[in-house]
């Protein structure tokens, strides 16, 4: 293990920069446990969880070599870790690389092979594993930062599963200041990541308390002015009216506007049952429910945020109601007289929410009277973040400078910040170039925000994890202060009690967890033989083996008639229009290849396929199809809901997609996944049968049904194996059709004219008999053909007769 230099009190190690890591006993103890087994490390924010992981990585390099992978949920956090690792490790900086969606997939593949430490967002690594671009075999240490995210379908879970299965000598460290609100949540994180040990240190531990200071938490109540109360009351009257309609339907028993969200969720479930039973009352109730949800958001903005935020919200709702395809709920809401009255009052109100004055007071006291240097103001609303920043700079500009810090992209009509802008803002805040950082939740988790004198919550946060993360921004090197503002008799009050209760529960749970760590570890030993035991005998391998043997005995039949965001971090760099792909068995490989559209990663199919023996998955941005299984087979996958949406809505994209497949592939396949094709929606069965028939007869597609994602996964593997092993076909990037019949070739040529499609092509050939006759026909003659109107005829003549001008 690492040694310490008594004179300088630094940790010395062959893989650590000299005199860089301060010797802290609690960090060394945690690293000592984590180097020996898969460990969850729980440590308060700001006390060096990343240093613990770094010490483990250095030990693994010294003991067994290999690579280290550190995963963090956001790009700014990834870059922060990379800067720290380059300073702290005594290896060349170029051996430490960053993987985000901004790095092209082919570059990542090469960097993976040459680097020693990879620091990445999980979505990018998940994509690279699924696409077979990286090999986890030589990775000897994986760190999951902010590991409390390892629930549901989050990418951490898949990466952990594959790492335990594929690595030659795996070791996992999970890090979080707040792993969960109860014992079950913490156990779930451990099970999902394959963790066996739990190490918890709180600020009560003597080794830790040396490095922390008291943080004073002050809850400050504010009263709403009469003007805002009048706006709220007008909106609440409409909410009560809509709830009365729902009460008449028998789905709720109250008209109180402060009805809980939990009860409203139950109402939605009951309305869905009415819709499923083909009762029109369900649709009426769902529209009223949508109005209630929109109005509650307006009330929340008025009560807890600012009238400016409410005005922006109303403006967006008006614009939405005017747009094509606007919902009746939006249109009814903005035309409601009492809502219009509330809108007018919001526009006429010239004052500010009383929270603004409180914020101003605390900021002035901290920076002026108390000689503070830095403040963070947290708010849930991006609109409020912008309004507060303008407020500070306009009214206190001579005394301080404020900057906003928000996430990327657009949200609710507000511009986001690029990664570069985020990094520049944090650098300037650290350097003291401005005093007040106004941030949304993006600065909560793990970012190396400098020590601040005041953390001000513009509103309470109704989750313990986020509350703890925010408070951790102060009290690290000196005594800090936390102020939480709440508007009396509003949702703030409810969130205050929810947050306080959950935070107390989490702190108590961590104390209990610390006291019964061995008991928890025993539970993990009993229940969690899953991730540690993945190997060649899993389901995937067995299924592939059965498929391989069984398919060899099948007759090939028609096979002899030969004729594919992180923060939205996809594969970054792919062309938006995508490629027309083919799949083939790779040289020196017994595996079949399946090309998957990377936009299909929302489903688990590509991930499950990539984990199977005998299957290679290649990710592409596919222009045609969702999956490509050979040079002639492409698959469009639709859930039952998506399929029915194309019948009841104006979106006809499915038929266009299948038409595209027909033009590029000899054997297009449509998979309809799920149960209730004839029961899920109020669609006549004959309409559904007609659509299926059209896909088969007019578009030449095979329509197959599957029960669920697992069934679809098995079917894709079977078809790919049959194509590439039994029929010995390739999966081609160009999707060329080989040895078409003469009729197929003629249809293909005519269908490609101005993208008129296979149905019109067959009609034209039936009418004119030859391709040449179609090409030379006049507009009027073309219009004599069934299904060819003036627009189509003009398009054909334009393509055929105009000079070529590249």
Image (cartoon, grey):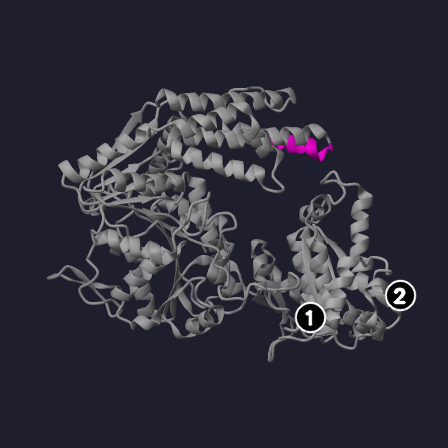
**Residue farthest to the bottom, as pictured:** 588
**CA neighbours of label 2 inside 10 A, class few (<14), some (14 to 19), many (20+):** some
The residue where tag 2 is placed is: 767
**Residue 128 appears at what percent x and percent y?**
50, 65
Instruction: Specify the quadrant of the image occupied by residue 520.
Output: top left
The residue where tag 1 is placed is: 630
Instruction: Let me know if residue 94 appears in the view.
Output: yes
**Residue farthest to the left, as pictured:** 7
Q: Residue at x 80, y 57 (%)?
A: 789
Q: Nearer the viewer, residue 160 or 279?
A: 279
Q: Nearer the viewer, residue 546 or 720?
A: 720
Q: CA distance from mark 2 to mark 1?
A: 34 Å
Q: Nearer the viewer, residue 367 or 800?
A: 800
**Residue 387 appears at what percent x and percent y?**
35, 39
The residue range painted magenta reads 268-278
Which numbered disc, 2 or 1, marks the residue that appears first in the sequence? 1
**Residue 33 appears at what percent x and percent y?**
32, 55
Instruction: Let me know if residue 662 appears in the view.
Output: no
**Element on which disc 1 rests:** loop
Instruction: Specify the quadrant of the image occupied by residue 458.
Output: top left
In the rendered structure, find residue 679 and report the number of the disc placed on it.
none
In the rendered image, residue 347 lying in the magenta stretch gets the answer no
């Amino acid at each position: 293990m690492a040694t310490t230099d008594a004179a300088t009190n630094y940790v010395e190690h062959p893989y650590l920069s000299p005199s860089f890591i301060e010797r802290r006993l609690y960090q060394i103890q945690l690293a000592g446990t984590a180097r020996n087994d898969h460990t969850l490390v729980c440590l308060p924010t700001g006390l060096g969880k990343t240093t613990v992981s770094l010490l483990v990585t250095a030990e693994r390099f010294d003991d067994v070599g290999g690579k280290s992978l550190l995963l963090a949920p956001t790009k700014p956090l990834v870059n922060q870790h990379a800067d720290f690792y380059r300073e702290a490790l005594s290896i060349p900086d170029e051996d430490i690389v960053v993987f985000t969606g901004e790095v092209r997939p082919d570059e990542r593949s090469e960097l993976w092979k040459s680097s020693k430490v990879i620091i990445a967002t999980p979505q990018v690594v998940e994509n690279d594993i699924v696409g077979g671009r990286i090999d986890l075999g030589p990775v000897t240490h994986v760190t999951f930062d902010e590991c409390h995210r390892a629930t549901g379908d989050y990418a951490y879970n898949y990466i952990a599963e594959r790492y335990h299965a594929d690595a030659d000598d795996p070791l996992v460290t999970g890090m979080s200041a707040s792993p969960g609100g109860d014992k079950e949540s913490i156990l779930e994180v451990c099970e999902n990541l394959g963790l066996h040990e739990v190490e918890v240190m709180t600020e009560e531990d003597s080794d830790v308390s040396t490095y922390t200071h008291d943080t004073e938490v002050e809850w400050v109540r504010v009263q709403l002015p009469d003007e805002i109360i009048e706006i709220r009351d007008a909106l609440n009257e409409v909410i009560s009216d809509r709830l009365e309609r729902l009460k008449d339907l028998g789905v709720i028993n109250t008209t109180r506007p402060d009805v809980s969200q939990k009860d409203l969720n139950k109402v939605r479930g009951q309305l869905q049952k009415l819709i499923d039973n083909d009762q029109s009352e369900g649709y009426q109730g769902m529209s009223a429910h949508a109005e209630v949800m929109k109005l509650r958001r307006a009330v929340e903005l008025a009560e807890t945020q600012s009238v400016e935020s409410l005005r922006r919200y109303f403006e967006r709702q008006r614009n939405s109601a005017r747009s094509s395809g606007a919902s009746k709920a939006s249109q009814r809401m903005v035309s409601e007289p009492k809502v219009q009255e509330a809108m007018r009052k919001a526009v006429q109100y010239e004052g500010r929410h009383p929270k603004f004055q409180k914020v101003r007071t605390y900021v002035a006291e901290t920076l002026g009277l108390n000689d503070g240097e830095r403040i963070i103001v947290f708010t849930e609303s991006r609109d409020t973040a912008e309004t507060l920043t303008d407020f500070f700079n306009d009214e206190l500009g001579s005394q301080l400078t404020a900057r906003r810090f928000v996430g990327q992209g657009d949200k609710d009509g507000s511009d986001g910040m690029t990664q570069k802008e985020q990094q520049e803002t944090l650098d300037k805040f650290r350097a003291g170039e401005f005093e007040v950082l106004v941030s949304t939740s993006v600065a909560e988790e793990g970012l190396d925000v400098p020590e601040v004198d005041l953390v001000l919550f513009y509103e309470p946060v109704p989750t313990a994890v986020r509350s703890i993360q925010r408070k951790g921004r102060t009290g690290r090197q000196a005594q800090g202060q936390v102020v939480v503002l709440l508007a009396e008799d509003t949702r703030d009050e409810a969130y205050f009690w929810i947050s306080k209760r959950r935070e107390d529960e989490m702190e108590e749970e961590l104390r209990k967890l610390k006291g019964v760590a061995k008991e928890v570890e025993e539970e993990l030993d009993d229940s969690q033989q899953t991730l540690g035991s993945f190997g060649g005998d899993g389901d995937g391998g067995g299924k592939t083996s059965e498929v391989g043997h069984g398919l060899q005995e099948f007759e090939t039949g028609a096979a002899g008639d030969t004729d594919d965001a992180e923060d939205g971090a996809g594969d970054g760099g792919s062309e938006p229009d995508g490629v027309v792909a083919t799949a083939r068995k790779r040289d020196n490989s017994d595996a079949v290849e399946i090309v998957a559209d990377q936009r299909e990663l929302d489903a688990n199919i590509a991930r499950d396929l990539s984990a199977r023996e005998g299957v290679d998955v290649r990710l592409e941005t596919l222009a045609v199809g969702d999956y490509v299984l050979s040079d002639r087979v492409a698959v469009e996958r639709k859930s039952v809901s998506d399929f029915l949406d194309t019948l009841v809505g104006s979106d006809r994209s499915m038929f266009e997609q299948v038409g595209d497949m027909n033009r590029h592939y000899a054997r297009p396949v449509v998979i309809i996944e799920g149960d209730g094709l004839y029961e899920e929606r109020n669609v006549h069965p004959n309409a559904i049968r007609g659509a299926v028939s059209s896909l088969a007869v007019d578009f030449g597609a095979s329509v197959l049904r599957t029960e669920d994602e697992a069934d679809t996964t098995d079917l894709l593997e079977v078809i790919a194996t049959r194509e590439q092993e039994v029929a010995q076909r390739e999966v081609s990037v160009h999707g060329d059709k080989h040895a078409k019949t003469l009729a197929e070739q003629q249809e293909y040529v005519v269908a490609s004219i101005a993208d008129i499609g296979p149905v019109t092509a067959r009609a034209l050939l039936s009418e004119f008999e030859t391709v040449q006759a179609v090409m030379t026909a006049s507009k009027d003659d073309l219009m004599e053909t069934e299904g060819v109107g003036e627009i189509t005829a003009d398009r054909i003549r334009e393509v055929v007769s105009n000079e070529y001008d590249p």
